[in-house]
Each structure stands twice: as C-alpha cells, then as structure tokens.
Image (cartoon, rainbow, N blue to C red):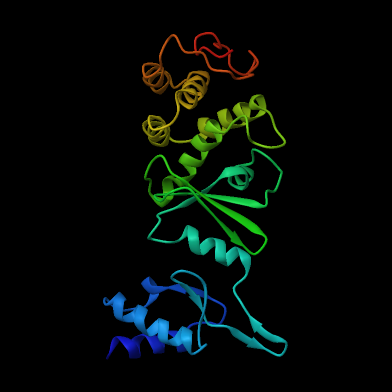
Amino acid sequence: MSVAKITRDFVTNIEGAKLFTYDDIPCLNKTSAAIELSRLFKKGIIKKISKGKFYKPKIRVFGEVAPNTNDKIKSYLKSDETNSYETGANSFRKLGLTTQVSNETVIATNGIYRKVKIDNINLKFIPKRVDVNDDEIYLVQILDAIKDINKIPATTPNEVVKYLKEIIKKESLENQNKLTKFALKYTPRTRAVLGAIFKEIGNKNCAYELKSTLNPMTNYKLKIEEDVIKDRKYWNFI
C-alpha cells in the first residue's frame, strides 16, 4: 500500500478534533506522509494549529469543532521531538505547593527559549537541565520547585520546604538517590536546599554528597525558620 493511501486512510479513520503529527502516521517514510498531509491541508480536509500539528475538524450543526486548549497543550508535552515536561506555577500547583492557577504554562524542553500563544494560554518553553524518563518527571518537578522556591505564588519558602520534606521523606531510597544525581545539574542553592531537606529527614549520605558540591564561602538568601531547617548556618542560609 502506498504511503499516500496509508496517510489518507489514517485521516479518514481518526476521530474528529483529535490532534496528530507526522509521527502518528503508521509508516516509515515520514517525508512522503508529510507531502500527503500537505495536500490534504490545501484541500481543507485537515487543519493545522502549528508546524507539524494537524487535526480533522469535527462537523456539528453549529459548525466545526477544533481541539480544545488542553489537548493543544498536551500535544507539546507528548512530542517525541522535544521530549518535554511541564514545570512552572501550574506544575507546582499539581504538586500541592500552591493553589493559584496561572494563565502561563511552562514547558521544559531540549529546545531553546521561546513563547507560543495557544488560545488564551501563554506557553513558555525553557531549556531543561536534565533528561529523565517519564516516571522520573515528578522528581525534576520537585527540583524545579526548589529552584524557583521564591517565585511560587501564594506561599512562602518556609511552607514549600515543610511540604517538600514530607513528600521527599515518603520517596524510596532509589528515588532519593535519583534526586541527588539530578540535582547536580541544578544551581548551588537548589543543591543546598535539597541537601538540608535530606539531612532533616535522616538521609545523611545524600545530604553530605550534596554538601560536598557546594562552595563553603557562598551564602544563599533564603528565609527559612530554624524549626524548618535546624542547621541553617551549616548550609549557609541567610
């Protein structure tokens, strides 16, 4: 069967208003599939929301239905091309660190910094610090929250650290070791906060490993009370 026929059959059978990309076409020759999709686009059979992202309109009594905003955003998160994950305020809300909803979705990718407008949502793409598997994304979102601890809306660094202590304490030793490994790609202050959390919850090995990566002469501005982090001076928090 020709690639053109495979592509047309795929479009015929796909659900209306569902987003798809070249990679979804069940053939190896993506160049030929892209050519056929371009033909179908010019004929109005499919529509495009951005480069390489298409959908077949769903026809209803009151007109055409396009993919909803959440589906559009998810299409960026699931892209094999960018190997991306959500971070920023909305990701921190899902972790339970804030209740505030942001109209900006931040996506960490292998690409460069850029912004895209999706309906009424601002999409901001930032370079990510470490490559992780899908089941490890949760861990780097914790590290991103520590990195942005002073920027998380409707909360305080004190509350964030108290909450993260409980989250990290419940993680397996394997995941705590992964957090330590991933943290090496983050800022010194992030490593200091994570190290302090590890010491508080009793994981001295991870705490000392992170401490050894820090410059003993560097101080970190962070308003943390002594009942949250006892050894503030040890970690050079001011």
Q: Quadrant of the C terminus?
A: top right
The image shows residue 55 at horizontal and vertical percentages of: 52, 78
Task: Using the image, determine if residue 63 lies above or below residue 114.
Answer: below
Q: Residue drawn 41% across and 82% down? A: 37
Q: Quadrant location of residue 226?
A: top right
Q: Residue drawn 42% across and 10% down? A: 216
The image shows residue 183 at horizontal and vertical percentages of: 41, 31
Front residue of 136/152: it is 152
Front residue of 48/17: it is 48
Q: Quadrant location of residue 100?
A: top right
- Residue 38 in view: yes
Front residue of 152/181: it is 152
- Residue 13 in view: no
Q: Residue drawn 42% across and 33% down? A: 179
Front residue of 204/132: it is 132
The image shows residue 219 at horizontal and vertical percentages of: 51, 13
Left or right: where 201 falls relative to 6: right
Q: Quadrant of the N terminus?
A: bottom left
Task: Using the image, determine if residue 100 lies above or below residue 186.
Answer: below
Task: Using the image, determine if residue 219 lies above or below residue 40.
Answer: above
Left or right: where 159 falls relative to 216: right
Task: Using the image, determine if residue 238 lies above or below residue 79.
Answer: above
The image shows residue 185 at horizontal and vertical percentages of: 38, 33
Task: Give the total of numbered labels.
Answer: 0
